[in-house]
Amino acid sequence: MSKLATFWSIPVHVLTADGDAATIEGPEGAAEFLRNHCRQKEGRHYRSASGLCADAAAHNGKLEVSREAFIAAMLEAGLMQPVQRAPAASAIRTAAASSRSYA
């Protein structure tokens, strides 16, 4: 019987130790990233995430708890990718209004 992959409800965007962007979609990818791409392999959050992601990948743990633990480990290691937020709706309306020309 094959094991089905599990995915988080929202992927996590991180940076590798080399500064390349990576998207982690579930606990299997997170466990692999922690083992092979995380430059800081110590610390409370790293240890917690390693165990929780491995458990969730084996369907023995809570999926979203593993995601939160992985995010904490990435913050601890300084590997979270900065979030690019869309401009606020009011800023979009203001920009659109100022670009209109009245003749």
Image: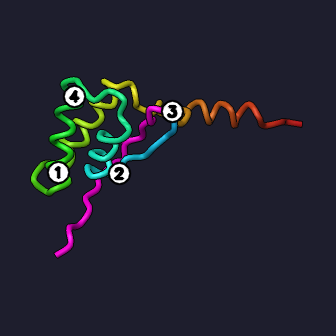
**Residue type of the residue flagged with mark 3:** Gly
Using the numbered discs, state the Cα–Cα distance from disc 3 to disc 4 in whole angstroms: 21 Å
Instruction: Give the SS element for disc 4.
Output: helix
From the viewer's perspective, is the residue at label 3 or at label 2 nearer?
3
* Residue name at image x 21 percent, y 37 percent: 49
Q: Which mark is residue 45?
A: 4
* For residue 32, above or below residue 46: below
Q: Position of residue 95 (x, y in %)?
A: 68, 32
**On the image, numbered disc 2 is attached to which residue?**
25
Residue 3 is inside the magenta segment: yes
* Residue name at image x 42 percent, y 37 percent: 14
Q: Are marks 3 and 4 in contact (CB under 8 Å)?
A: no
For label 2, the crowd category at 10 Å Cα-Cα, with few meaning under 14, some 14 to 19 and many 20 or more, is some
For label 1, the crowd category at 10 Å Cα-Cα, with few meaning under 14, some 14 to 19 and many 20 or more, is many
Instruction: Give the SS element for disc 3.
Output: loop
**Residue type of the residue flagged with mark 1:** Ala
**On the image, numbered disc 1 is attached to which residue?**
56
